Amino acid sequence: GTRAASHWVNNSSHAADHIAAGSCESAMQLLNRQIAVTNFAPLKSRFIGVYCGALTSVPGLALSPSLQMPLMRTEASDSKSLPATCVKLPWLIDTLKGAYKAFHAGSFAESLDLFKSILYAVPMVVTSSRTESNEVKELLDIAREYITAIRLKLAMADVSDPVRMTELWAYFTHCNLQPAHLLLALKSAMISGFKIKNYITAASFAHRLLELPEVSSEKNADLKSKAQKVVLKSEKEGRNEHTLQYDERNPFDIDCEAFVPVYRGSPVVKCAYCNSAYQPEATNKLCSTCGIALIGVETLGLPTGRSS
């Protein structure tokens, strides 16, 4: 009869099913068409894991080789059969928790690796419901935001200009982070703005910080007091000594290559996979956030459900 792997390739447009069947070439073609992937090196370990996870070996008779058996997520006898896949949503959620923990502890390199592992795993996930599919998309968005924030933080190590440092902290506060992490970012941005005597900017960070529920906790009493003092001092001074490339009242995307704001209404192109934003000159370049897909290429996106 027809090998199960042949059914998997014929029955699905999901790259994970093609990888499980050992058809890595067609899987790569699918990922290129669906999310413009051109750099497959970071995905190598995922490819190997998905392929190995779809097969098991059953011992045969004495002195005979073991039998390789396919693992299914559908009925094994069905000509519409599809393979079991090893990359699951619960694993992604556990990885996210580890990434959050490392971020909170200031272990940014470790956190970056964990968030990137989520990005590299998402194309291999086959979901069983619309709810799961939405959760996977949300994980992709979270990973993108945190990778951008970490890259901004790491970029600060090479910056000696305090004005540019304040700009980077300002952009950092516009990444979509957990409230506890945003609080730390706003604290640093507030201090950085105050040090360069940009009192209006520092006050805006202080106001945003004071609006967070976490700042009212007992452990943040000193921070709350400091923010209130910054507001009072800034209201007294009422000036910015330096002009920043930053306008908090004008919504913007962060250019993930140049680390500058791309304000609403300005031309913007995005990564075909992770949706990171760039200025138009980055079109057809490799995304700096995910490192696997092209910028500014229009695609259909990933099929994440089992019906793909």
Image: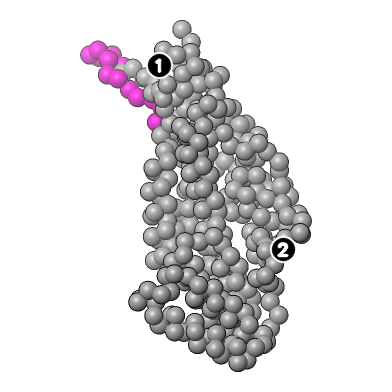
Per the image, label 1 sits on a secondary structure element best described as: loop
Instruction: Examine the rendered structure and indicate whether residue 28 appears above or below residue 110.
Output: above
| Residue type at numbered disc 2 | Tyr
The answer to whether residue 268 of the structure is visible from this angle is yes
Q: Residues within 10 Å of mark 2 (few under 14, many from 20)?
A: some
| Residue type at numbered disc 1 | Ala
Q: Position of residue 5 (x, y in %)?
A: 48, 19
Q: Residues within 10 Å of mark 1 (few under 14, many from 20)?
A: some
Image quadrant of residue 26?
Answer: top right
Q: Residue at x 49, y 76 (%)?
A: 210
Q: Position of residue 242 (x, y in %)?
A: 68, 83
Query: Which residue is the site of mark 2?
Result: 263
Q: Residue at x 50, y 38 (%)?
A: 133
Per the image, label 2 sits on a secondary structure element best described as: strand
Q: Position of residue 79 (x, y in %)?
A: 48, 13
Indicate which disc residue 76 carries. 1
The answer to whether residue 122 of the structure is visible from this angle is no
Q: Main secondary structure of the magenta part?
A: loop
Q: Is residue 181 magenta?
A: no
N-term-proximal mark, 2 vs 1: 1
Q: Residue at x 41, y 34 (%)?
A: 86
**Viewer-nearest residue: 119 or 285:** 119
**Viewer-nearest residue: 259 or 207:** 207
- Total labels: the figure holds 2
Q: Position of residue 248 (x, y in %)?
A: 65, 71
**Viewer-nearest residue: 214 or 173:** 214
Indicate which disc residue 200 carries. none
**Viewer-nearest residue: 58 or 142:** 142
Magenta span of residues: 53-65
Q: Residue at x 25, y 12 (%)?
A: 61
